[in-house]
Amino acid sequence: MKRFLSTKNTFTVLFLWAIVLFMVVVLYLGITENELPLLPIIILSLVIGFIVWVLLDTRYVIKNHFLLYRSGPFRGRIDIENIQKIKRHSGLYVPVTLKPALDTKGFIITYNKFDDLFISPIKSDVFIEEIRKINPKIEVI
């Protein structure tokens, strides 16, 4: 079992932590001054928890013949034998449906017939090596 954390784009991480800080301040002021009803307190707390969860728990694991990914509550697994192509990608716009990553540089993984996923493992070369040990037919672009 090999674990890979996600690379983190500095701007993205700072932006998300700034949002968390802002919401914590709003929450604190609303609670201390009794101006915030219960529902917004609950919603703000859940959003804060969600963002922090994604920031602290985005990773990829290669276990047996599966690639497991998780980013906060978003989790999934891909059979490595079904991966057809891994393409390096860099840019703000990532043309995929699912992006469990905290960076704009990473890989677009194409698997099954029409599925794709964007990930950004820290040790990208080691990641590719480990994937290709299981499925050497994967095209790396």
Image (cartoon, rainbow, N blue to C red):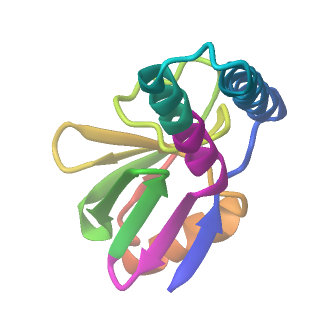
Residue at x 57%, y 64% (from the top left corner):
128
Is residue 41 found left or right of 139 in the rendered image? right
Q: Nearer the viewer, residue 4 or 90?
A: 4
Q: Is residue 59 above or below residue 18?
A: below
Residue 62: in magenta span? yes
Residue 101: % across, % down: 57, 43
Q: Residue furthest left?
A: 113
Residue 98: % across, % down: 38, 36
Residue at x 39%, y 60% (from the top left corner):
138
Is residue 41 found left or right of 78 in the rendered image? right
Residue 95: % across, % down: 43, 22
Q: Is residue 84 above or below residue 9?
A: below
Rendering quarter of residue 93:
top right
Q: Nearer the viewer, residue 40 or 59?
A: 40
Is residue 63 found left or right of 77 in the rendered image? right
Residue 58: in magenta span? yes
Residue at x 39%, y 79% (from the top left corner):
134
Which residues are drawn in magenta?
48-65
Residue at x 67%, y 37% (from the top left corner):
103
Q: Is residue 14 above or below residue 57?
A: above
Is residue 6 found left or right of 96 in the rendered image? right
Q: How many marks?
A: 0
Residue 8: % across, % down: 74, 44
